[in-house]
Amino acid sequence: MAFTVKNNITWVGKVDWELRRFHGDEYSTHRGSSYNSYLVREEKAALIDTVWAPFAKEYIAELEKIIDLEQIDYIIANHGEIDHSGALPELMRRIPDTPVYCTVNGVKSLKGHYHRDWDFRTVRTGDRLSLGKKELVFVEAPMLHWPDTMMCYLTGDNVLFSNDAFGQHYATSGMFNDAVDQEELFAECMKYYANILTPFSPLVIKKINEVLSLKLPLDMICTSHGVIWRSNPAQIVEKYLTWADAYREDQVTLVYDTMWNGTRVMAESIAEGIRQADPDATVKLFNAAKTDKNDIITEVFRSKAIGVGSPTINQGILHSIAALLEQMRGLKFKGKKAFAFGAYGWSGESVKMISDGLKTAGFALIGDGIRTLWYPDDDALRACVGFGKEMAEKIRQ
Ligand code: FEO
C-alpha cells in the first residue's frame, strides 16, 4: 500500500495492525502502529526513514514497484531507532553507495545497531539538501525522543517530517488526521506524549518555539508513527505545548494493589471523601496489577494529584506498585501532588516507602499518608473518608 501524501511525496511505510507491545514490553499498542516512510521525488529522489526490520523485505518489494532503487539519490535517517532504520541493512545491501543523511549521533546509533560503514553525511540544524527546485532543511531535535533525532522540512510543499514527535501508535486505514476517529486519535496522542515524551517536556517547548521562530509555513506534519497531520497541523503542536507545561486536568487518580482487599476498600473510601469535598473533580481508581501500565501512566499524566496504595509485604510493597513508582520516577512529572495509603498486618512499612518513592519521582507530598491495621473496619473506613476530604482540601490549596 503506497499513497500520495502531497504532490511528489509518497507514503511507502507499513501499517502494523498486529502490534500489541512496543519497545519490548514497555509500551502497549492496543490499536497497533505504523512505521511511516516517505519517498520524495523531485529532480532528486530522497527516501525519508524506513520501517522495522521484520517488514524489510516486504517494504523493499513494495518500494521497488514505485521506484528503481538505483534512482534513490539520498536516504534520510531522521532517527536511528530500529523501528525506523530496521530496513536499512537490506536496502543498503541493494544500493550500498547511496549517501545516508543523519546527525552525528545518528551515525553512532546506526553504526551501533548495524555495524556497517555506510556513506554517512552528517547534518546540523539549518543545513539544506537540494532536491532541485525544493530543498530539505534539517533541524536537530535531540531528546525528542533520543539524542540522535532530527526532523526535516521540505520547502515548496511546506511539509515537516517530524519523526516520532507528534506521532501516535495507531494503525488506521485513513492515514490522515481528518480521516480517523478523533477520540481514538487524541487518546493515542496523549498516551504517546505521557509515556514517551513527558520527561523531555522542557525540550519540547524549547524545540517547538525554535521551529516556530523560523516562521516556516506549515501545510502538513508527516510523523513516523500513525496519522499524517494535514488538517490544521498546528493543532497537535498546540497540544504538545499544553501537555509540556505541567499538564493536569481536574482529576485525582488512585492507583493501588491489594492482597485481601483491605487496600482496595481504603482506596474506595478515600475516593468517597475526595468526592464529598470536591464534587466537581473526576476521581478514578485503578488496580495496578489488573490495568495496563501505560494506560495508568496516561491517567496520572491527566491528574492534578494521585494517591498510591499498597499493603505491606515482606517489609516492602507489592511489585506492581514498585514498578509504577519506578516508571513515574523516569517520567519526571511536574506540578502534581500525591499521597500514600495502605493496609498492613505486622510491620507496616508500605506507606512510608510509597511516600519516599513519590517524593523521589518528583511529586509534591501532601501529608504522611494513611495506613490501616488489618482489614479496615467501619471506624477505619470512616477515617479513610476523612483522609480523602483532607487530601481534597490540600489538593485545592
Ligand atoms: Fe519510533 Fe524512537 O522510534
Image (cartoon, grey):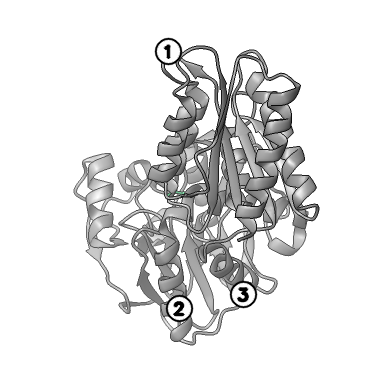
Q: Residues within 10 Å of mark 3 (few under 14, many from 20)?
A: some
**Residue under circle 2?**
209
Q: Residues within 10 Å of mark 2 (few under 14, many from 20)?
A: few
Label 1 beta carbon within 8 A of ligand 1: no
Image height of 296 relative to 378, above or below: below
Question: Where residue 140 sits: x, y (%)?
Answer: 34, 68
Report how far apart the C-alphas of labels 3 and 1 lie in the structure.
51 Å
Q: Quadrant of the C terminus?
A: bottom right
Amino acid carrying label 2: it is: Asn
The reply, left or right, for residue 43 in relation to residue 253 is: left
Name the N-terminal-most of marks 1 and 2.
2
Observer-side mark, 3 or 2, equals 2
Image height of 364 relative to 18, above or below: below
Report how far apart the C-alphas of labels 3 and 2 lie in the structure.
13 Å
- Identify the residue at image location x=33%, y=42%: 89
Count of marks placed on residues: 3
Question: Where residue 179 sits: x, y (%)?
Answer: 76, 59
Q: Residues within 10 Å of mark 1 (few under 14, many from 20)?
A: few
Question: Where residue 369 sits: x, y (%)?
Answer: 54, 37
CB atoms of marks 3 and 2 within 8 Å: no
Q: Nearer the viewer, residue 346 or 258?
A: 346
Q: Residue 294 occupies which quadrant of the picture?
A: top right
Q: Which mark is residue 314?
A: 1
Please, what secondary structure does the residue beneath circle 1 have?
A: loop
The reply, left or right, for residue 214 in relation to residue 191 is: left
Report how far apart the C-alphas of labels 1 and 2 lie in the structure.
49 Å
Amino acid carrying label 1: it is: Asn
Name the N-terminal-most of marks 3 and 1.
3
- Identify the residue at image location x=28%, y=48%: 110
**Residue under circle 3?**
234
Question: Where residue 13 sits: x, y (%)?
Answer: 54, 50
